[in-house]
Image (cartoon, rainbow, N blue to C red):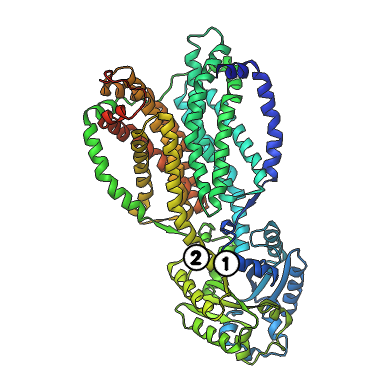
Amino acid sequence: MHKIADFIVKNKKIILILNLLLLIPAIIGFSLTKTNYDILVYLPSDIETLKGQSILKDDFKMGAFSVSLVDNDISDKELITLENKIREIDCVNDVVSINDITGTTIPLEMLPKKFVDHVSTDDSKLLLITFSTGTSDEETTDAVKEIEELSSSIKVGGMSAMSLDMRRLVESQTFTYVLLAVVCCLIILMISLDSYIVPLILLGNIGVSILFNMGTNIMFGEISYITKAIAAVLQLGVTTDFSIFLYHKYEAAKKTKKANDEAMSEAISETMTSVIGSSLTTVAGFLALCSMKFGLGKDIGLVMAKGVVFGVLTVLTFYPALLLMNDKLIQKTKHKSLIPKFKFIKPIVAKGYKWIFIVFLILLVPAYLSQKNTSVYYKLDTSIPEDYNYSIVSKKLKEDYGLISQSMILVNKDMDSSDMNNMIDEINDLDGIDSVLSSDVLVKYGISSNILPSKIRNILETDNYKLILVNSNYEIASDEINEQIKNLNTIIKKYDKNAILAGEGPLMNDLVEITAIDFRNVNYVSIGVIFLIMFFVLRSISLPALLVLSIEFAIFINMGVPYWHDTSIPFVSSIVIGTIQLGATIDYAILLTTKYLEERKNGKDKKTAMEESLDSSVSSIFVSAMCFFGATFGVYVVSKIDMIGSLCLLMARGAIISMLVVMFIVPSVLLLFDKLITKTTLGFKKGKIV
């Protein structure tokens, strides 16, 4: 360690220049990394619903589709002109309107009333636009943007329009997220550190590590918009304490060393072991997300684990160089730290640790039950503000056309017509089914396939499949539609065992089922991995279990708050927050526990050991937790994207709850189980335990 530290100090100027030069490819990589705005693409590729999406794309040339609205104040001639302009846009496959049917030999009166009601009202007409590229592909969202710019009379709906609006939201807010996080952390660091310039150096160092992290995401090709929005903020929150620890070690070493270089070398040596060990639990927590079948976990997990690694590397190399080269300025801007000493905690813990533990036991069960019963929602468009195009179109489609959620059934082209009719009749009899449309339904009304326009036939039939469009009265991702989808699958499989149910509703149903399993698995994996790391770091059998249980209690409280407020949280938050909070805040408990073990091994009785441990650890824990809180709470306050705002609120609240648990409950646990801990932890010699 000392040789590495000496090398870093000796080559500080080279390290500084090298890091600044590496920012160039990092910025280029960041600008070239694509962002995905459709989290449904993270579903496992082998599920039947996605196979259906592939068939729609390959056979029906329908990689994506949009149900759009056109104002009735434009003439038929203008509508035809508009349709032709839309067709000229790259990746637009075709455009179909009511004119494509009524403009033929088919009178409007011949069409089913339900069908007519679903394609035209007094105020507007529907356009069905199909795209050759996927729902969230950049080409598709760019095409949606071009369509919107063609005329103020058209408003584009559908999942691609939602992806475009989400892109606009994220692009407009990401800089604000980072700026707020930096400002909040800067205020906290200005108060807590003893120099006005160190917080700026510290945040500059973290900024470099964030750019390295975001720039190297180019290796993945793309990252999700959720990862992009929270990565910088989360990396800032969980790696700030590494920099604080090194600075404190450097200032302490300067009191015993003649030269600053020697002091920094010693500080790096002492910090290296502690920071690397501490970061392992955080990295493990993020990597545990990779165990999810839902690919978003891997997306967030890999990016954030990589971010922590870059945070450690820059703290041990770039940050020391910055501190050494700005030492005179640091000394000139010294001031008294304004952090409270928290002296009141020691007597509370020393005298009342048994009562604190009893309260902990009493609250453990209701906290667990509360978080278990917290309501979770899966509706993806909740984050889109009401004044955005997607929300406006969705509201109008629902209120004027009764189009709430659509599914698509793919069946064998050669299915017997009587079986087809019987299947459609059974589908119509299901609760919540509004309408069913297929070529066979149109035949019932005397519209045979030979008089149906080719573009309509191409949407409803191919050489291998027939497409049946099902409109439901139930909201996407609701319990009612999920039950309806199960019944639909039962019916269609009865008539065609290879039939596939596709569309947004079935995809969301798959999302619900898959993430429910992921929620359990990722928690087990994160607890197991962090338990093992703590076993080797603390060299104890009992301590990992006691400390993990304490932080899990903090997670239960955090996740249970929405239950008591009668609010719902996004499914993403419910899956990842436990892992993030455990991985990021278990370090607080490890810091206190490590100091306590040192004092006990030095022969001090348990109460004295705890008092000294609290004296040396509480301020560090407070600053670390407040930085995590500040970085995430500001984002929650300004975020218009509910999925991101909710996750940041949970992280901010989780940091404070974990801090309080470590300050009060962890000390009570250590004191109460002291005999068990000393007997099951390496390093304690018999006869020396007081």
Residue 294's disc is none
Q: Position of residue 401 (x, y in %)?
A: 55, 76
Q: Position of residue 278 (x, y in %)?
A: 47, 31
Under mark 2, the amino acid is Asn
Residue depicted at 64% across the width and 84% down the height: 439
Point out the image quarter for the N terminus: top right
Res 325 seen here: no
Q: Position of residue 260 (x, y in %)?
A: 56, 12
Disc on the earlier residue, 2 or 1: 1
Q: Nearer the viewer, residue 193 or 681?
A: 681
- 379 over 649 or under it: above or below: below
Q: Assess disc 1: are there few (<14), some (14-19) or many (≥20) residues with their C-alpha within 10 Å of its C-alpha.
A: many
As helix, strand or loop, the secondary structure at mark 2 comes to: helix
Residue depicted at 58% across the width and 60% down the height: 388
- 50 over 542 or under it: above or below: below
As helix, strand or loop, the secondary structure at mark 1 comes to: helix
Under mark 1, the amino acid is Thr
Residue picked out by circle 1: 49
Q: CA distance from mark 2 to mark 1?
A: 10 Å
Residue picked out by circle 2: 509
- 682 over 628 or under it: above or below: above
Q: Disc 2, disc 1: CB below 8 Å?
A: yes
Q: Nearer the viewer, residue 344 or 548?
A: 548
Point out the image quarter for the C terminus: top left
Task: State left or right for residue 514 relative to residue 588.
Answer: right
Residue depicted at 58% across the width and 69% down the height: 503
Q: Residue furthest front?
A: 686
| In this view, the mark in front (2 or 1) | 1
- 283 over 15 or under it: above or below: below
